Amino acid sequence: MEKNSRENNTADIASRRDFLRKAGTYTAASLTGTAMLLSPKPSKATANVSWAEHFQKHYRLMTEEEKAEAIERLEKRYSEEFGKKVSVDGSTAIDGVLFGYALNIQKCIGCRRCVKACVAENNQSRGKEQEIEWIRVLRLEKGNFSEEDRDKGGYPDDYGIQVGGNAYKPAGVVLEGQHYYEPDKVPEKDAFYLPMQCMQCEKPPCVKVCPVRTTYRDPDGIVVIDYNWCIGCRMCIGACPYWARRFNWGEPDLPKEDMNPVTHYLGNRPRMKGVVEKCTFCIQRTRKGRWTACVEVCPVGARKMGNLLDPDSDVRKVLATKKVFRLRADLNTYPKFFYFMD
Amino acid sequence: MTSNKWCGNLIGLCFLAAVLPSTTYGEATPAGKQCFESRKDMSQVQQKAIHPGEPNVKCSPTTGAVLWWGDPFDGTIPMGDMPVEADYSHEEAVVRPREPQIDRNKLLTICSMACHNGQYVPYPKDKLPRPLRMHNDIVPDAMKLKHGKGAIWCLDCHHAAERTKLIDHFGNPISFNEPQKLCGKCHGQVYRRWREGIHGKRIGMWKVGAKKRWWVCTECHNPHDVEHGEQQSGFAQLDPEPAPMLPKGMKNADHERLHEHTHYSGH
Ligand code: SF4
Ligand code: SF4
């Protein structure tokens, strides 16, 4: 194009490589035929995984060069599959950063926008066959007390042995939490909401049980998964007390136009059938300084996130000034996801 | 008819009459896809491409709520000088101006020009509640304002003479872009937490010292109804996003809706 002899060698090589890569993309795409190009769905990932990708090493054991090659391979494959320029980032943890999260359950209105924002950002499978969501919002009842229940609460009879409380009739808060609530409007008068996602435990049981060590804790505290090394045994799903992990039972369904092309190797890059996935605190965003999609979307500002090692960060200010708790603290998982109230 | 007579006296009112039949206060302009940020109909965004194939926002197909920002700082202006030192003093803080949102049908501008110019509607003698003939679309039952339990009324927040402004304790005008300066007059504790960044909403960069877009009070709360009936949550009710997919083979979610669990009954 407007190239002239003054341009140095590196630029030349780079542009040639660029040209070859682009040429390769278009050839491969045209080989698969017009049908694929027009179809809103990408071709099946499992069919496109190259020999080199299939036999690549565990991400953590790769040299820098091998990592770069793996990333380039993926960028090429994804760009072909989704018909647009897809980037795969390999950024490592930022020095001096340990990510933490705080969620205000007093504010949460149960709108589930965080759930859908996460899907828009993280390329989960959607559609009728397999819908994957990393965040789950639980609806909890505030109470179910009635005068009638006080005396007719199910005690066997006037002289019966009382086995403690209303043993035969539920009273008070009795639902164990609803996942599938569908009221016309939220928040409802008699309910509050508790969103759950990966807590990025400091002592993650999922990491302990993984037989191939494909899931591990990175220095910034994010528990990541090398999807290519996952054997799909689902041990981690059983070990996680917070029900944070999801399994791709089928081929993921990710429409081309909805696919978010800004990805990270350990984060939102498209997954394949047979691997486990979960929240990574939007690693592709947070390692570049941006807040997670769920923090940004929450219409009531219930979600706060930042560096636990920085006393001036939002999350540390919450820890310093609010009443906080963690889920299942008794399990010694040390989650970095805190709940708080005003 | 009547408005034609007024036209002779007040030029602006003709304009008002021309605008009123076509738009009602609070209605979205019907051009392109409109989504809302926090408050439905009061924090609208127009969907557009910021780069080819890259939208400024992604919206929920079911509720029309914004789910995702391509550029968190699109359409923002600097927060401006704030009277108190806080987080925003040490990093780049931007806001989406409220004035274009509130004034999107130009009613605010016209009202202050046509009616509240100090002549047509004279400045009120006091701040006491009285039956209103206008503004019932904004505050349906003004005599029972759902804010302050009867202890405050319109002119405690709105400037008596400058209708495009709010008012501070000294009688100075406050821009609609900076409602925090007004709300902070009473809600000191909340104002303080907001300044620290742990009350309210911000998007952009998480790092202390990096750029953030701050949400101001009226982007989430309706100052004319903070009670919201029985909810008392401070937020208007919204449509929730759809429930997750049921596990394969499960027909419905009745099991989690029943109060009488099987293991409780039977005796
Ligand atoms: S919440 Fe579950 S998936 Fe996340 S780190 Fe803890 S055990 Fe692992
Ligand atoms: S977006 Fe915010 S308010 Fe809505 S469910 Fe999620 S945490 Fe709760």
Image (cartoon, coloured by chain):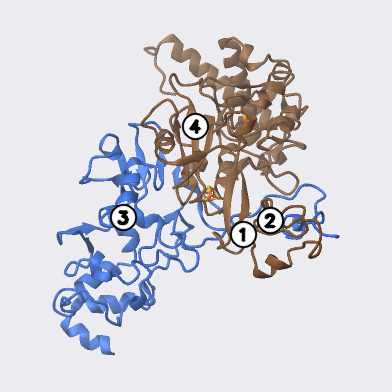
Give the amino acid type for the residue marked by disc 2 in the picture: Val
Q: CA distance from mark 2 to mark 4?
A: 32 Å
Q: CA distance from mark 3 to mark 1?
A: 30 Å
Q: Report the residue marked by disc 1.
A: A143
Task: Compare residues A159 and B133 and report the one nearer the observer.
Answer: A159
Give the amino acid type for the residue marked by disc 3 in the picture: His
Mark positioned earlier in the residue sequence (1 or 4): 4
Marks 2, 4: nearer the viewer: 2
Residue farthest along the front direction in this orientation: A159
Q: Is residue A263 shown left or right of residue A126?
A: left
Give the amino acid type for the residue marked by disc 4 in the picture: Gly
Q: Which chain is blue?
A: B
Give me the residue at 57% from left, 10% from top. A65
Crowding at label 2, few (<14), some or many (≥20) Cα neighbours within 10 Å? some
Marks 3, 1: nearer the viewer: 1
Marks 3, 4: nearer the viewer: 3
Instruction: Say what secondary structure mark 2 lies in.
Output: loop
Instruction: Say what secondary structure mark 3 lies in.
Output: loop
Q: Which chain is brown?
A: A
Q: Are marks 3 and 1 on the same chain?
A: no
Q: Chain of mark 3?
A: B
Crowding at label 3, few (<14), some or many (≥20) Cα neighbours within 10 Å? few
Against A140, is B104 above or below?
below
Q: Which mark is residue A100?
A: 4
**Whether label 1 touches label 4, CB < 8 Å:** no
Give me the residue at 25% from left, 53% from top. B181
Q: Chain of mark 4?
A: A
Mark positioned earlier in the residue sequence (2 or 1): 1
